[in-house]
Image (tube, helix red, strand yellow):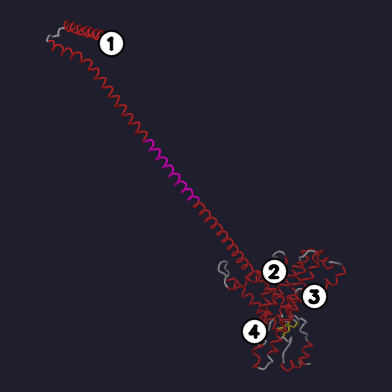
Amino acid sequence: MIGDSLLAEADIEIGEHKTFTFLNMTFNADTIWSTVIAGLVVIGLGFWMRSKVSSTNPSKIQLMWEAVVGEVTRQVEENLGRVHPFVVPLAIALFVFILVANWFEIIPSLHLLPAPTADVNLTYALALLVIVGVHIFSVRERGLKGYVKHYFQPHPAMFLLNLIEELVKPVTLALRLFGNIFAGGIMIAIIGLLPIWALWGPNVIWRLFDMFIGLIQAFIFALLTVIYFGMASEGHSAADDERKPATDPQPQLSKGH
Amino acid sequence: MPTTNLAESNFLVPNATFFAELFAFALVLLVLARYVIPPINKALTERQEGIRRQFDELETAKANAEAAENQYRSQLVEARHEAARIREEAREQGAQIVVEMREQAQAEASRITAAASAQMDAERQQVLAQLKSEVGTLATDLAGRIVGESLEDEARKRRTVDRFIAELDGHSIEVEQSGTSMRQR
């Protein structure tokens, strides 16, 4: 296999993490610590903005935050019909955190600071948080009866498809993000195999493109979160519409590439 | 060997890192939701409110300016009308004064004329009366001097006057008689 031999030659580690064990459980040390740094960066940006917040003379950092908050609020309003006090902060936190984490990919750090989003542990965690939130929200909005009933809409025979759809949602959410960022990292590693005189061009171009992918993926994750919440609050008759957004992300995804 | 490594730990299978990530993101979410997003929303709302207020103030100022301009224009028109009215009034008053003065002058003139003629009448009457009273005395004086006899005593004076009057009467009869005879001839 060409791929294997190439990887073997270059000694590229794929899905390899520096691990440690604690209470008989394996932890990926590099993912955890780059997550901590990403979290600190996000919180640091937040508090930096907070220290300079002004309603009359906004600083650049404040305008950046305002753009994110404004956009997410608009999306939530469009999809949910109102601004839900829980969905807006969740989507904002997801977008900013994923964006910062994705851009770690661009920083050349000799594998010391890998993008934590290139590890399924992070993306599964985020997806699970979102989907659990969506289902709780759905039960609250429709009542338990309405929630169960929506699996049998528009016809009881659709139950299996509906169930699969709901089960697939978190998996696609997690693996889409993981796959994009992970692939970006592999691309950088493969470009690194080029001879030194040909390396810089593709390297710069790919890193710029990777920044774009990172932005798009963070946006898609946050947008899908909002859309799933929007679907969860829809009425019983809106079962047909519920399937549309599930297919919508694919064109958006292909746009990103 | 890399191949065995890939087979041993599939990178799609999560490990305990999952829980650490869950906790980490939950913490980030909590901090953002509690400490970062509220001030942004507050600032956004305040700024929108400020902009709305500024627009309101602008509208009010514009309305005020328009009202002031309208008032100014209407006052100007009013002032022009007032000026025209005053001019017209002054002209009328002037004409009236001229008419009045003329009437007054004419009345004065006629009054003066009337007064003068009345005075003249009175004087004439007075002169006439005086003349009448004096003519008799003068006549007797003159007659006495011509006759040479004093008519000073009352009886004689009366006699003379009576005779004079009788002569006058007789003379006038004669004249009438001669006049008729002259016409008969």
Whether residue A141 is situated above or below residue B157 in the rendered picture: below
* Quadrant of the frame with the N terminus of chain A: bottom right
Q: Residues within 10 Å of mark 4 (few under 14, many from 20)?
A: some
Magenta part, dominant SS = helix
Kind of element beneath mark 1: helix
Marks 3, 1: nearer the viewer:
1
Considering depth in this image, is A7 or A120 the residue closer to the camera?
A: A7
Q: Which residue is mark 3?
A: A168
Q: Residue at 40% x, 38% y: name it.
A: B96
In this orientation, which residue lies closer to the viewer: B118 or A112?
A: B118
Residue type at mark 4: give it: Ile
Q: Is residue B7 left or right of residue B24?
A: right
Amino acid type of disc 3?
Val
- Where disc 2 sits, the SS reads helix
Q: Amino acid at mark 2?
A: Gln
- Label 3 to label 2: alpha-carbon separation: 23 Å
Q: Which residue position is annotated with label 2?
A: A75
View extreme (right): residue: A157
Most extreme residue toward the front is B185
Q: Which residue is mark 4?
A: A107
The reply to whether discs 1 and 2 touch (Cβ–Cβ < 8 Å) is: no
Residue B15: percent from left, percent from top: 76, 81
- Indicate the position of residue A234 as horizontal and vertical percent values: 77, 65
Q: Residues within 10 Å of mark 1 (few under 14, many from 20)?
A: few
Q: Residue at x 69, y 69 (%)?
A: A75
Q: Earlier in the sequence, mark 3 or mark 2?
A: 2
Instruction: Decide which of B151, B78 is in the foreground and name it.
Output: B151
**Pointers 3 and 4 within a single chain:** yes
- The structure residue drawn at horizontal position 23% and vertical position 16%, both measured from the top left corner, is B132
Which amino acid type is marked by label 1? Arg
- Which residue is disc 1 drawn over? B183
Q: CA distance from mark 4 to mark 1?
A: 174 Å
